[in-house]
Amino acid sequence: MSEFVMSIGGDPVGPESTFGVINPSTGEVFAQAPECSKDQLDAAFTSAQSAFSSWRSDEDQRRKTLLAMADVLLASIDTLAPLLTTEQGKPLNDAGVEVFAAAIWCQYFANLETPPQVIQDDADALVHVVRRPLGVVAAITPWNFPLTLAFWKIAPALLAGNTVVIKPSPFTPLSTLKAVELLQEVLPAGVLNAVSGGDQLGAWMTNHPVPRKVSFTGSVETGKKVAQSAAPDLKRVTLELGGNDAAIILDDADPQWVAKGIFAGAFNNNGQVCSAIKRVYVPDEIYGEVVDALADFASSVKVGDGLDPTSKLGPINNAPQYERVKMLVADALSSGATAVTGGHAMDRPGYFFEPTILTGIAEGTRIVDEEQFGPALPVMSYSSVDDALERANATTFGLSGSVWSADPDRAAVVANQLECGTVWINTHLALAPNQPFGGCKWSGIGVENGPWGLSEFTEVQAVYRSRTDDGLNISTAGLVS
């Protein structure tokens, strides 16, 4: 068992106390993680604050550092991926892809151009708009994609000139701690700090006087608490919260083809994706065929320990989520739903649940109305597209959704009516560093990725250079007729 440390001020910092990290494939503790104390958190924020002035001053160096970070991550896949699989549960190949994605995000932002915007250039004045860093960023990340979602925050925050203190989920702290430890070899001291601990640590971070920005990915309930904690100090916030993504299948879609895409979009990472398909609407005419095809995929997929190369789906990550999925499926079955396949926890150690397809279910059932975040998918029929749209939009969530059809133009007309931050046509979960990702309604505030996500880590500054002799030219444009 390796010893895991926090990174504070460029140095490895051992724990004053620890907490156990569970391997979800066994349900047993396999390692100890540091429990950050208040003094250690103060030290992390102090080091980030001290590093800020020099880090913000050299954009070329920031870009070179991000590229060096990408190189370190790529060289560390064989170290980080098995650790990620052991603490998170996902198959080893998927864990390797996650480390690779973290490097890609660093490379993307290292090369993202950020020119100032000139809004006036005449005899009176030169006026341009620039983006300035905020200061220290507190980043809090979830357990489903610990590394990918960490670097959705770290890469743009660092490019913008901020410094960062990151806290991973207590269910999956180790891969983030190890990654940040490895990255210290290419980072100036204090620019990127990593601490670990439970929910109390997150509350300390959002209430701390140093950070000027909190970037949080997690549940709606916790996101509301983060917003409340940040408000008295007017900290900027980005909140990427839950989703209840609807997929609408149109009547011209081939059942076998569409079922393959729907299954991939719903059961990726064992359904533990905020923007995964959470409910499906199928026209009456092809409902039975689609259900049968989905059931075939669900019953044939190999579920097992992520370190087993034959496993395609791993366990649910943690005991509370495992119990929630069991409860939601049991509630659906007791309300009259049918599990065409699955429907039960697997009889083995760890947090394994059978991939489940539910029919005979409708709105008003918890697994339809809430976010299940696990390997259980309700499939519902509809008689008209207007009916499907109304039902799909009748939710407090608004993260993403998709429409599936043999005619992409027809699908686009329907997709434009979905109330969500991202809508896909004939695919789902097509994410990239250059496209914005965020939600409306209760699914979040702000966006991540692309130049839009970069802007979330900045403040706007207008720079006005007078070109008149007395410098007193005050524009009255628009003030007088």
Image (cartoon, grey):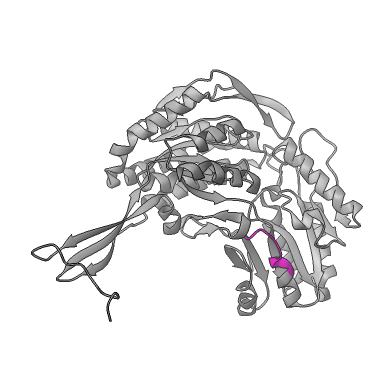
**In the image, farthest residue toward the top:** 16
In which quadrant is the C terminus drawn?
bottom left
For this rendering, which residue is in front, 26 or 126? Answer: 126
Q: Is residue 282 magenta?
A: no
Dominant secondary structure (helix, strand or loop) of the stretch shown in magenta: loop
| Image position of 36 with respect to 429: above or below | above
Residue 338 relative to residue 426: left or right: right
Q: Residue at x 63, y 24 (%)?
A: 19
Res 285 → quadrant: bottom right
| Image position of 354 with respect to 245: above or below | above
Magenta segment boundaries in residue numbering: 391-399
Res 477 → quadrant: bottom left
| Image position of 418 with respect to 322: above or below | below
Q: Position of residue 340 (x, y in %)?
A: 87, 57
Q: Residue at x 68, y 30 (%)?
A: 22
Count of number-bearing discs: 0
The answer, for residue 157, to whether it is visible in the render is yes
Q: Residue at x 29, y 74 (%)?
A: 479
In which quadrant is the N terminus drawn?
top right
Q: Position of residue 223 (x, y in %)?
A: 59, 46
Q: Residue at x 72, y 75 (%)?
A: 250
Residue 390 relative to residue 129: left or right: right
